Image (spheres, rainbow, N blue to C red):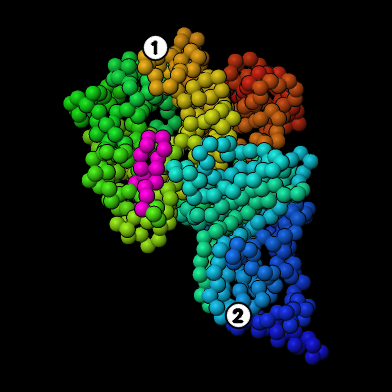
Amino acid sequence: MSSSTVTRRSMLARLMMGGAAVTLPDWGNAIWAAAPAGVRLTDGTLTIDYDRAMRAQLSFGGKAITSRGAPEALFVGGRPLGTFLLLDHAEIPVAGVHGRGRQHRVRATAGGQVEQTIAVTFLDAYPGLALYEVSYRNTGSAPLAVSGWRVATHDLLAHRDGAWTFAGASYPDRRDWIQKVGPGFDQRNFMGMNASDYGGGTPVAVVWRRDVGLAVGHIETSPRQVALPVAVQPAATRLGLTGDETALLAPGATLTLPFSFLMAHEGDHFRSLDAYRRLMAERGVAAPSIPASSYGPIWCAWGYERNFTLDQVYGTLPKAKALGFEWAVLDDGWQTAEGDWKLNPAKFPRGDKDMRAFTDRIKADGMRPRLWLAPLAVDPGTDLLRDHGDMLLLDRNGSAQNVSFWNAFTLCPAYRPTVDYFRALVRRIMVDWGYDGLKLDGQHLNGVAPCYNPAHRHERPEESSEKLQDFWKAIHDEAIAANPQAVVELCPCGDSFAFHNLPATNNTPASDPLSSWQIRLKGKTFKALMGPSAPYAGDHVELSDGGDDFASTYGIGAIPSTKFTWPKDTPRPMEKLPSGGFVLTPAKEALWGKWVALYREHMLPKGLYLGGLYDIGFDKPEAHAIEKDGVLHYAFYADRWSGAIALRGLGEGDYTLVDGFSGKPLGTASRSRSTIQAAFDRFLLVRATPAGRGVA
């Protein structure tokens, strides 16, 4: 063994000990020559190749899908901290809440000043997915002012057909959660507040080509103030996980980054979000049990707006019941103000007695009452704000967080008096007033800013956002304790739903969709995040394209919902009514009745949404499929279509095909004859029943 080899190894040993700093300019060449050439981490589906400078390239199924770059970095002064040199690698078998797998532990150093440790775990149950545990230890002699970091950041190589992206962040323009990646696309996807009352979301970003996709996110059991940026690069699309919170890292101290994952997969965002849901369930964050009542069709009195009268509601109930709607929702306008939640004496002059008489009347008409509520919002001038101003969420300057839609302020969900106040209010609504469900509404519900109110004595300002999920759990549990069949609907208007809040809701709406496209893409996303039989409502059909697109709700396995008025519209609307208004005309009545009857006959939300069969971005026409009791229900959407349609997922044997809306026969199909010719405008429903069972 040469003396030069011994010298190089001794220098590496000094670096690996992580003690005093090593001056690289004098020894750089020798150190780099002695370092390992690189390391390959793989589960046979996803491969991560690191070179000695900790630059990585990803492969999927043996094919390179990213360029080589530095996926992990620590930032000091806004710039990456030098180049990390690979030190060593170890591999061990592991077993835990996610099952069995193999963990790779990789260490590297930046000039002996900072040690990087990356633990990458491949799980037997999740091919193509890697869990990341990344930490940085200050091995120098001086404090280190950290300005940010990044994890699992890669450039997915461009494809001639382009790319699509899912981003779980919330924005005040209520943009599509799924977008085509075009020239100049750049979206930060910050999981904190992107406006005073828009924030939070699902901490996952996905970019996919026609042949492969990449997803990245964190799997912490509470929200984190991180970003998942997606941005076009030359000949690629970049995505990753980043943080920009500052920290002063003392000598010997370690900075541990959020527990994260990276996944390569085929198809659109459904597979990666479904895997994320299962991982989180294994970590204890999962959707609650779903009562049968959650699947009931919904009529909402919001068509009469805030100035509704009880006579208007009473007059519409028999029509709603006759059409097959099961829920009657009393929306905004019953209260004196957001925050006080006292009964409006003009509508309920006898107070609690009148409200109880109202719910008794709904039940007597054969429906279930649900009440609108906007928790955590408090209006200026209310008794609550005067008597309990200590509940306010305050920023570092002592200012309140605005709720723009109601000209209100936000209360802190991590302050015990706030939680107790709303638990008592829920008990009053459910027990004293007799409601069977809650509609929890408002864009401010999805996420809140860090709270600096000194009265709350938070250990960290971020407690307010991290404990929002606990606030919703307290509301949910209070409602279920009062009525095990209670529906707790969470509707954060236009936000990308915060995944950590979903365990506290058993009904999710499209939440003020801007188009039928949003109804469908949100539906597919929810079926991934809450499970293939999730009770998702299409929101008021009047918000869909043309105001009548029940097909978009029905075909994705969603619950029908409407805010029709009858026999006439409200005489003094707050906003201009659409052409024809919301009144239920004879033509609408026939159409609404047919869709609700189809829904009640087949109950597709209780089937299995087969989200992996079709790509919502690349497949034309757009397609969705649901399996229910052995029958396959397909839904296709396009402004206009004429041509071939593929029926994917057929089993053995022949299937009899019918038009799911008109009932007309469409022939037969089998796995080997799964393509049919079709022409339609807007939508086509195809029901495939195994031959010999009769047409379902």
Mark 2 residue element:
loop
User: Residue 235: where, in percent of width, then height?
Assistant: 77, 48
- Above/below status of 516 relative to 65: above
Q: Name which quarter of the figure residue 318 lies in.
A: top left
- Above/below status of 133 relative to 292: below
User: Could you tell me which residue is drawn at 57 percent across and 47 percent down?
Assistant: 189
User: Residue 421: where, in percent of width, then height?
Assistant: 27, 45
User: Could you tell me which residue is drawn at 29 percent across and 20 percent down?
Assistant: 310
Which residue is at the far bottom?
A: 3
Determine whether, in the image, residue 409 is placed left or right of residue 509.
left
Name the residue type under label 2: Gly
Residue 208 drawn in magenta: no
Name the residue type under label 1: Lys
Report whether residue 84 is seen.
yes
Mark 1 residue element:
loop
* Residue identifier under label 1: 568
* Residue identifier under label 2: 18
User: Residue 142: where, in percent of width, then height?
Assistant: 55, 78
What quarter of the picture does the C terminus occupy? Answer: top right
Magenta stretch? Answer: 398-414
In space, the residues marked 1 and 2 are separated at their CA atoms by 77 Å
